[in-house]
Image (cartoon, helix red, strand yellow):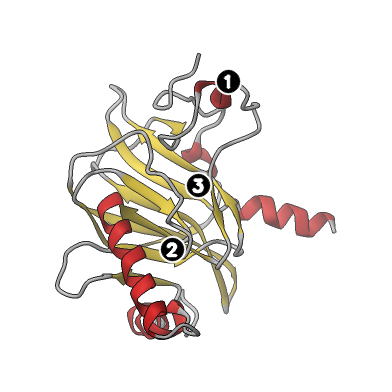
Amino acid sequence: MKDNNEFELPYGLDEAMQAEELVEIHIGDVNLPTGRIIAADPFFTEEQRPFSRTVEPDKYPVYIYVAKMDELHHRIAYAKIKFRPETASRWILALTDDLTPEELNDLGDDEFYGFPVESGLACFLDEETNAELIAKIDSVQDGKPESNYYDEVLAEEFMQYSGKNNFSRQLGDWNDHHPNAGSDNNAIMFASGWGDGYYPAYWGLGENGETIELTIDFLISDFEDEDTED
């Protein structure tokens, strides 16, 4: 029976990343006051559970890895939280704490559990921050029932934070959002590859099982292959 924290990947994520020409960009530091991490579409975090594996509460750097499609077109292929400076030597599928042993045992070799994206955005945030983000979105929409949190709050932040970067669109492709001004609790948000989809995250581990990183794979190559076949 597979345990949530020991579900081995059938391939090396590092090899996949090295096979592509990617630009690494440090886009901010995520505050993790509980060490219980959620990866999700920022507008659909209410039902997304944190991962089973936890980390030491602290602030950690977040990186994106951008694929150059052409001179004026870039896509985020991966997003990563780096917990330790060492290089990961193996990867396991990051699983949420609500999966049952039966669900894990039924997972096929080419299948994965991940998280859905419906807004073209994904994010890393702590479980504590998630409660604050949900409350903030609700308060904005309660005050203006016809409002949209992206238009009301996030659009200007994205544009100011990353819109002038050469690897971002003018509207901004990543952002450091604090639901409550003055609080360290934040959600690091970023465009999700080709957009909407269902994406896996992987824990990168060291030789002794220590947690080195957490990486979301936006399956850029998979979508490119599908486009080629069409």
Above or below residue 205? Residue 134 is: below
Type of amino acid under label 1? Asn
Mark 1 → mark 2, Cα distance in angstroms: 29 Å
Q: Which residue is mark 1?
A: 105
Residue located at (44% from left, 32% from top): 91
Pick the front one: 99 or 212: 99
Percent coordinates x, y for residue 29 in the rendering: 24, 60
Q: Nearer the viewer, residue 143 or 66?
A: 143
Q: Residues within 10 Å of mark 3 (few under 14, many from 20)?
A: some
Query: Residue at image x 39%, y 65%?
Result: 189
Q: Choose mark 3 or mark 2, whichever is in front.
A: 2
Which image quadrant is residue 26 in? bottom left
Cα–Cα gap, marks 1 and 3 = 28 Å
Dot 1: few (<14), some (14–19), or many (≥20) neighbours within 10 Å?
few
Against 17, residue 124 (above or below) is below
Q: Give the residue type that dot 2 points to.
A: Pro
Q: Which mark is residue 220?
A: none
Specify which label sits upstream in the sequence, 1 or 2. 2
Residue at the outermost top position: 1
Badge 3 amino acid: Met
Q: Is residue 137 above or below residue 109?
A: below
Q: Which mark is residue 17?
A: 3
Q: Which residue is mark 2?
A: 42
On the image, the x and y values in percent for residue 75 come to 55, 66
Query: What residue appears at the point 58 percent right and 20 percent down from the top-left corner?
Result: 105
From the top left corner, tell me how far across and down residue 161 is, in percent.
33, 79
Report whether residue 101 is seen: yes
Tell me which numbered mark, 1 or 3, is placed earlier along the sequence.
3
At x 18%, y 50%, the residue is: 33
Q: Residues within 10 Å of mark 2 (few under 14, many from 20)?
A: many
Q: Which quadrant holds residue 135?
A: bottom left
Tell which circle, 3 or 2, labels the residue nearer the N-terminal end: 3
